[in-house]
Image: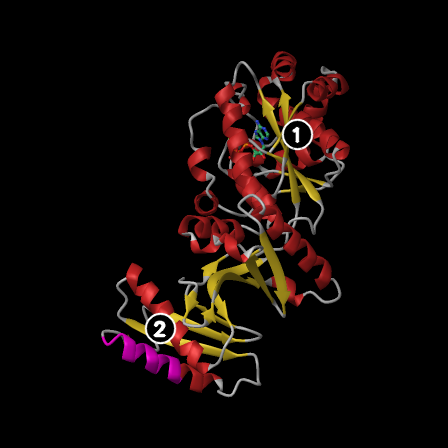
Amino acid sequence: MRNTMDNVQAQNVILARIGEIALKGLNRGRFEHQLIANIRFTLSEIGSFSVFQSQSRLWIEEREKSQNYLSDRDTLDSVIDALTKVFGLVSVSPAVKFTGGMKDILEMSVNFVAELLEKSSYQTFKVEAKRGNKQFPLNSPEICADVGGAILDAFPDLTVDVHNPDFVLYVEVRDCIYLYSRIIQGHRGLPVGTSGKGLLLLSGGIDSPVAGYMMASRGMNLDAVYFHAHPYTSDRAKEKVVQLARILRSYAGNINLHVVNFTEVQLELYKNSPQEMLTVTMRRIMIRIAESIAIQYDSKALITGESLGQVASQTLEALVLTDEVAGMPVFRPLIGLDKEYTTQIARRIGTYETSILPYEDCCTVFVAKHPQTRPKRDHIVNAEKNLDIDDLVQRGLASVEHIMI
Ligand code: ATP
Ligand code: MG
């Protein structure tokens, strides 16, 4: 936006709308506080911004007016991309802010539309006005009519279409005046940090990153654990998991990724556990190791990407036997979703392309040929008698490498 129009000083700002938090009663302050902290954190990687709250809205501005970050197209895009990923925001709009009267609104509106038309070949529009400041001499319909008229005069090729316009010019008269036309949807949810922390069992597949995203969208901080079977699985498989954790970080904030070298444990299991029970015995060990890490780093729940019936380890019987060794809740947000739906989410959140890179994961290397789909409790417990479970867990824990994402 041109920053001056005659005497009017205009400033580029971003308006962000709060979702579910607005429904919170007494706790609302805590949620808003966390939301603002999360916005500051994510934007601090782009530049120096101020975040204000006013009624049920947030406003993001450049800290120094001279910075002009928001008038740079690429920077503006990065800011919007970062903001839409902050859980708790419903939508964001880049806006122009200024003070003045009706004459200024008309001039700035024409100016705003001129800029829009430089980039797009719009033919129809409508104006929506909202007057929050009741001192303002014109009411909302009058503002709409005057602004619409000024635009029609300035751009004779445009026509008004109130039902299906190519663009809408929003005019909000509050403490200042705001103009905007774009409303970009956010991911909604609750601010990360308002629901404690969970430890995500993160593989390189499609499902577990989506599971992490879903729990983060309910306000959970995430840590992650990846079971790596070097040299049976390559460093590229690990890199892929690191990359997935980086993508998750843009939604969930910092993630402490714990990489367990699982090779010794798996070889031991492979040797000493009956083949058809390998799936469940292995998952029970994974859960035990994950839980120890969770306790150590203050996570209160485990999170997996399991979906009922998807594979042998995800039948009800197998899930029951897996849960049995967990002393904390195991959240499985995908339990009732089919793969197609999960895949759609993975595409939308940007993890899909990384997830389908063809590097093997530890469970495909040591997979049982005919896993039991209805494992029996006695059989599993008997199989575990041939194993020194505590020792295996300790060996897994001793191998952990920590990567801060
Ligand atoms: P995903 O697509 O997430 O890999 P999946 O459909 O391949 O899931 P499984 O391989 O049975 O299913 O794994 C089920 C869940 O167990 C995963 O979603 C993940 O949470 C966890 N998991 C599996 N393998 C690993 C691993 N190597 N490291 C960490 N967690 C894992
Ligand atoms: Mg997998």
Give the SS element for disc 1. Answer: loop
Q: Amino acid at mark 2?
A: Val
Which residue occupies the foreground of this view, 312 or 24? 24
Q: Decide: few, some or many residues near mark 1? Use Cα within 10 Å; few <14, some 14-19, many ≥20.
A: few
Q: Residue at label 1?
A: 376
Per the rendered image, the range of residues in magenta is: 145-156
The location of residue 189, given as percent across then percent down, is 59, 55
Cα–Cα span, label 1 and label 2: 73 Å
Residue kind at label 1, given as amino acid type: Lys
Residue 179: x, y in percent? 45, 70
Q: How many marks?
A: 2
Foreground label between 1 and 2: 2
147 within the magenta span? yes
The mark found on residue 281 in the picture is none
Instruction: Please tell me which residue lies in front, 223 or 158.
Output: 158
Give the percent coordinates (x, y) of residue 137: 51, 88
Query: Can see residue 18?
Result: no
Q: Residue at coordinates 45% horizontally, 72% vertically from top-left? A: 7
Q: Are there few (<14), some (14-19), or many (20+) residues within 10 Å of tag 2?
A: many
Most foreground residue, 166 or 68: 68
